[in-house]
Amino acid sequence: MRDWIYCDGDGGDRGLVNRRTALAAGIGAAVWWMGSRTAFAQAALRPDRSDGPVMVVVFLRGGADGLNIVAPYEEENYYRLRPTLAIARPMDRGKPQGERLIDLDGFFGLNPSLAMLEAHFKEGRLGFVHACGSADATRSHFEAMGTMERGAESKPSQQLSGWIARHLNSTPDRRDPMRAVALSSVTPDSLLGNTSALTINNLEDYRLGIEGAHSIRALQALYAPGDDILSVAGRDTISVLDTLKRLDPRKYVPREGATYPDTAFGRSMKQVAFLVKGGFGLEVAALDLGGWDSHVAQGNTSGWLTNLLTELGGAVHAFLHDLGSEARRVSLVVQTEFGRTNEENSGFGTDHGRGGVMLLAGAGVEGGKVHGRWPGLTSVRRGGPGDLDVTTDYRSVLAGLVRNHLGNHNVGDVFPGARLAGSSAVKSG
Amino acid sequence: MKLSRREAIALAGTALVASGCGISEQLQTLVSQPPEPLDRNEEPGARALARAGFGHDPDSLDLVREMGVPAWLRSQTEAPETEPAWLAQRISRLDVVNFSPWELRDWPESAVVAQLQQHSILRALHTPWQLRERMVDFWSNHFNIYAKKGMGAYRKTLDDRTVVRPHVLGKYTDMLQASARSAAMLVYLDQQASTASHPNENYARELLELHSLGVDGGYTQDDVMEVARCFTGWTEERGFLRGKGGFAFDPRLHDDGEKRVLGHVIPAGGGVEDGNRVLAIVAKHPSTAKHVSGKLVRHFVGSGHPAAEEAVREAFVRSGGQTKAMLRALFDRDEFLQGPPILKRPFDFAVSATRALGIKGDGGGDFQQHLAAMGQAPFQWPMPDGYPVEAEAWTGTLLARWNFAQSLAHGRIGGTPEPKLTGTPEEVVSAVLGAPVDAPSCARVTACLGGITDLADAAALALCSPEFQYR
């Protein structure tokens, strides 16, 4: 008996078997036929699904120091306020290349730990929005993250559901089992209020507990013939499981030259690329990278912040390269809850601030630029060092991508009350 | 096509032997027949238990058989709050049913949430008062409170036992009034931040939109703001600067001016009476009768039954908002038992699966994790509208249902014993679906099993079937 779920991929004649032949061949073949019809037609090879737009949202938890990621080297205050943490100007011949900023536009320079992203920026695939953030002024991690994940202006307690959940709920026509995936051990707040989004720490955990060829065949048979909403969903789920088994994320080989960092985050980014390329119907992926709360000894071109940036940059670079031509339907957003103080503290670190930097790459993004109105490093907060004013509402960027890239015209439901004037960082239409 | 049990078994046997070559066309047809959830063929007792409660278990099936469906349904509307001795004793070991929010304050939040969930699950699994627990589910979602907002779990323990449970089969107005004095509800909807100078409209809006009139109930934004003014000062009792979980009216925060709500003038100087006036006005509003009765009908039989909705609306009006009267009016309608089945939500699925296998589960952490993976752990819906009822909301997590079914049938859920399965695979399928072995649904599921002989595998697959996902 042919066991379709394990066989794979190359069976070129499958589509040619007609129903009558299959029936004549008996029950095994009939189940195989029903399975193949669904797996074949709906998973990897279902064109309407594998060509859809994708948005990948990475949240840097802890408040990443935007001023040392994309540094305003033309502003003297930067060097004055950060005597030990500031990174040398691009043209500073007193430092080796790896310890100088990489010039982006004559004003901002990229942290040299992110050198792998330089070409993506120069070639227009990647850009930044600076002084970007929310209206939340508590400088509390919890409040600021809650605000952004809920797509609120501030006061997250008044907006209970997450913005990705609202996007999914406002476009209920797409119901693929892998439509929204959080590669995380806990459901992020951005997905609160949607019942179908998947939260899995590792894609390898998306598997059927039912074992044995007989049981699997029985499950297929149970869901094979019905036209009710549940039978259709059952076939979709089976086809995803089948494709996962066939393509197996553990055996996934990225495109030549794409080397992901050997970390949990690197693995997650690789699994997102795998899902995009495998045609699983992925539309939104949410990932986390923690550890950005650099109050002490953050370093400038070496140290743990540098290591984190190397991990982030390495994963983004590998991801963009790995996607290859698929990058045209994938946009990547890297955000953080707030930036950090302009001035370094006595522990050679920085404290919670306001405006931060957002990284954007891929489809729908105006790359090659640092977007946003630069407010300058002059703001002073009563009783403490100043921080960067927020001049771009993070929602204008997300809303622009949700509307223009994901094609959700109900974007007002996703970001209620937001002024949805597009950000220059997002391509129109 | 109809197959007798004997034929189906014989055919299934052939399938095993034939292994794909020259199999009977009859079995072929059976396997490729779509599931017919619309073709109700459970026995009447199982059908009544699935529609009015969380499905059949061996004991409840015996009871309904003995009483007859109409008498059993009627008796269910007279359910007491109490439980049989063993269940009462099991529940009494939970701290959340014994202590006040203030006394629970040193418990970790996660432990309080887990116990709240366990309490709901234990009762739904084991109580003979199945209708009462379904109504607890209904009203807990109608007056939804998110346990993880602002320490809501602690206050929800009190809300569960003083707001929801005492009134689930009683008067709607009583529950509405209790809910308006529930610190859990007031804090969840930011009422503690509502003052004369800055009225917060959150509670006022949800009171009109969700709890009473309904979104198309004929109120305006002005009504929302006026209702918010009426409720200023309705807040949580505090002690040592901390919420104690009780209700308090703080006259210093109250706006004592005149208000106008839904055409009624509420004179100045009413104090706490302003809020009471609003509750009386909305409880009597015709839109409330329509909104609440319609939602109740859709909970039980799904949408598309305007005549049933009208009959139940009339019962609401006639009885002054008695839930018992609404339910009896619904039970008198053919739609109640014979209407097209609707998709079980995950809580219903998990509880009915456990009951169908006759398992005495404890509803503990492991069970709760499965529910969370399926998307419906109790008290975890963040928004005030309660878990969705649309089938579309629940189709993305089928894998989690299948994995739960597999773990359940094989005794791999902590705190939930392994089922004691006896008989043949066909008999196991029949026991799970609550239908005779020769009923079309059982015949189809059995045929799909192919030659599976392991009883736990058969039980798992029957629980996985599309047929079992509907009620």
Image: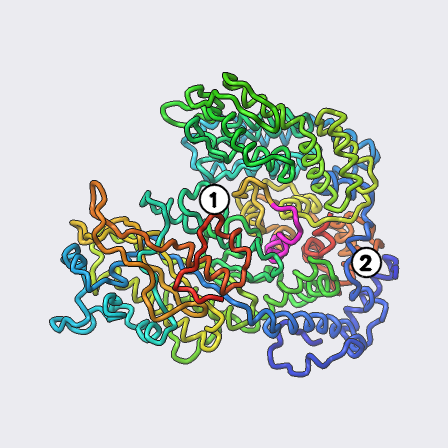
Residue B262, percent across and down?
A: 61, 29
Give the amino acid at mark 2: Ala
Picture disc at residue A132: none
The quadrant of the picture occupied by the N terminus of chain A is bottom right
Q: Which residue is mark 1?
A: A159
Above or below, A19 against B301 in this view is below
Q: Residues within 10 Å of mark 2 (few under 14, many from 20)?
A: many
Compare residues B117 and A229 and report the one nearer the observer: A229
| Residue type at numbered disc 1 | Gln
What colour scheme does the image use? rainbow
Q: Looking at the picture, tell me which residue is in the foreground, A334 or B362.
A: A334
The answer to whether tags 1 and 2 share a subunit is no
Q: Is residue B63 visible?
A: no
User: On screen, A428 above or below B335?
Assistant: below
The Cα atoms of the two marked residues, 1 and 2, are separated by 49 Å
- Kind of element beneath mark 2: helix
- Which residue is found at the position 23% from the left and 66% from the top? A107
Instruction: Give the letter of the chain under mark 2.
Output: B
Q: Nearer the viewer, residue B33 or A395?
A: A395
Chain at tag 1: A
Which residue is at the far bottom? A12
**Residue B26 magenta-highlighted:** no
In this picture, is A195 found above or below A324?
Answer: above
Residue drawn where x is 60% and y is 37% of the image: B210
Foreground: A231 or A165?
A165
Q: Which residues are magenta?
A: B388-404
Answer whether residue B389 is magenta in the image: yes
Question: Label for residue B443?
Answer: 2
